[in-house]
Amino acid sequence: MKPYSLATGCGRVGYGFFNYVIVQINGEKKELGTSLSVTQLLESLGIRPGRVVIELNHDVLSRDAFEDTILKEGDTVEIVHFVGGG
């Protein structure tokens, strides 16, 4: 079972094609609408940004950069969840 799902593609009215980029998220290739920020990705997955660490192309991304970081074709994203316990 996957903890998230994504819609595929973002239609462009009047052009007759879908405009999307392919990124790898936690080891799986996904089609995303263009100009999607890391914050928007997390929202689309139902994930609260304060509970995860994002690794983008093997570099840890600061939470301050989530909103301004736009995902591009070929990016690799790892979403690491914090798990509480005791």
Image (tube, rainbow, N blue to C red):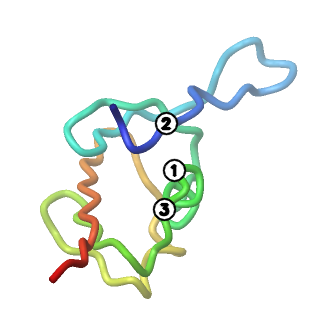
Report the Cα–Cα distance between label 1 and label 2.
6 Å
Q: Is residue 65 above or below residue 8?
A: below
Question: Please, is residue 26 above or below residue 12 in the view?
Answer: below
Residue 5: which disc? 2
- The C terminus: image quadrant: bottom left
Q: Give the residue at x 51% y 54%.
A: 41
Image: 19 above or below 26: above
Marked residue nearer the N-terminal end (1 or 2): 2
Q: Amino acid at mark 3?
A: Ile
Crowd class of label 2 (few under 14; some 14 to 19; many from 20; radius 10 Å) = few
**Dot 1 and dot 3 residues touching (CB under 8 Å):** yes
Q: Position of residue 12 (x, y in %)?
A: 76, 27
In the displayed orientation, state which residue is furthest to the front: 86
Question: Which residue is tagged 1?
Answer: 45
The amino acid type, in three-letter code, at marker 2 is Ser
What is the quadrant of residue 25 in the picture? Answer: top left
Residue 85: quadrant of the picture: bottom left
Out of 30 and 12, give the one closest to the viewer.
Answer: 30
Give the mark, 2 or 3, whose residue is nearer the N terminus: 2
Q: Percent from the top left, x then y, of residue 45? A: 51, 50
Residue 67 in the image: state x and y as whole percent: 54, 74
